[in-house]
Amino acid sequence: MSSSQNLVKELTCVRCPLGCKVKIEYTEELEVLNVSGNKCPRGREYAIQEISDPHRILVTSVKVKKGKYLLASVKTTDAIPLRLFDEAMKIIEKLEIEAPVKRGDIIIKNFLETGTDLIVTRSVERL
Amino acid sequence: MKYKTDVVVIGGGAAGMAAAYRAKKEGVDVILLERDEDTGGVLNQCIHNGFGLQYFRKDLTGPEFKEYAKERLEDIEILFGTYVLEVRKDRTIVFVDKRGIHEIETKALVMATGARERHFNSLPVPGKRITGVFTAGLAQRFINLENLKPGSKAVILGSGDIGLIMARRLTLEGIKVEAVLEIMPYPGGLERNVQQCLKDFDIPLYLSHTVTAIEGDRRLEKVIAAQVDYKWDPIPGTEKEFEVDTLITSVGLIPQTKPVDFVETDPGFLVSNTNQTSEDWIFAAGNCTVIFDLVDYVAKEGEKAGKYAALYARGEYKKGKKVKVRKGDNIGIVHPVYIDPTQESTLYIRVSRVFDRASIKVLPLDVEVIEDEARPPEMIVVKLKPFDENIDEIEVMADELISKLG
């Protein structure tokens, strides 16, 4: 019976700059009872994911060889589990790509088996 | 060399790119002056996402936003590596580049010069001026563009968005962030950034705290912080010491209005809803007018400035009637400060204190918006339709909305 106590979490949705305050009520078994405060369906999705396994888009940069700039910024095409960030950064740290690269170029497909790709967000011309 | 054009835009950041694009679309000749070798301004180093949701309807990083905006500038003359020396009342712009000094004769001007970071040295903090103290924007530039690591252990002063974003960025790059200090009793940045930049990485945020001294011999060794009272005076006995080699400051932005010094400013350019300054032919948009929360707002304002500057250059928009916008109760900032009532307007408002539920009213117009958890760091946007030209002044005010059931 003790496990049936309902939990409540108040979150700030980070899916867009509106930053809705979303309130989620759930059980210890992660059964969702109620979601409120979200202005769009993405807020509901966010809250549900947040109580079990928070996901975020990872943004960082990688070294570029023979480029007009030293670095090209990169991001994951979709949010990946926050718990994978350390591992992801260790991989990205060792990467070196060669110019030219274009915005949208895929550097790693299915990054860490998350189903998302690591892509370039800044085009870098070759020197 | 002597140039002649309809509209000159100074500054190729988000506001300037949007202004140049829109002015050109109105069918006039445009010259964009950019001091760097590329457009984009600060967008180039803001590699995080969250840009463009309103303007491009996509979740973009800064560099992506810049590339999308730049692709629309194909047939516009952009002069890179230029520095504007003088803007003359006779509508001549004087600039310098590698080739020498040049003049442009124009019909209208859009100032899109952005803002500068307030520096630690402008704060009354005792201690030597040692190395290891950086503004958040400079640290961002080092890490994101120049592949340089500013230090290994850091404290961040100020919880504005740039400070918060740098807390996450430093952490990802293996630099330990010991604390973020905020002098106000609430965070200075957007709530979503507090979540995804601090809470996600267990970085402590100390509200009502500031730096009281820095110590070190040549390089920073220690930051001393204390809690402050309501007058921002440090409370004795609350001192905390942080042994760090880096202090990152995110203590505000100052609109950049130079070299134009003959129009009304406070401290940014004071403009109307058509982005016109006190000088008929000079328009201004973006962070050189007021510091905006979102680049999306900056780009929209830039487009508007470009449109009216083009209309002005063609003689289709003169000086509009100016209705003064007054700051009423609980309003910290309202932008713009004048309204031409024959045109639509967008008001950007910051409340001056925290509200559970705020009612924002525009008087005497019959306009009211309700905002849950209104805080000074989050701009509230209110659109106004054209209104009665006999109204001399409008006033924006905020009130706590108390539930009738409560």
Image (cartoon, rainbow, N blue to C red):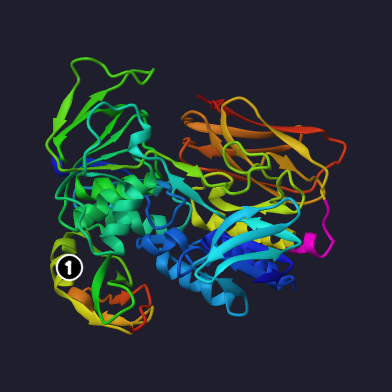
Residue nearest the viewer, comparing B234 with B377? B234
**Is B205 placed left or right of B53 in the picture?**
left
Give the residue displayed 23% in from the left and 24% down from the top: B226
Q: Chain of mark 1?
A: A
* Residue carrying label 1: A88
Q: Which residue is the extreme one toward the top? A: B236
| Percent coordinates x, y for residue B93 in the rendering | 66, 59
**Is B52 placed left or right of B310 in the picture?**
left
Q: Secondary structure at mark 1?
A: helix
Residue nearest the viewer, comparing B344 with B264? B264
Residue nearest the viewer, comparing B394 with B259? B259
Q: Which residues are magenta?
A: B310-318
Query: Type of residue at label 1?
Result: Ala
Residue nearest the viewer, comparing B92 with B163? B92
Whether residue B315 is in magenta: the answer is yes
Is residue B305 visible in the rendered structure shown here? no
Whether residue A47 is in magenta: the answer is no
Density class for disc 1 (Cα within 10 Å; few <14, some 14-19, many ≥20) is some
Give the residue displayed 24% in from the left and 72% down from the top: A62
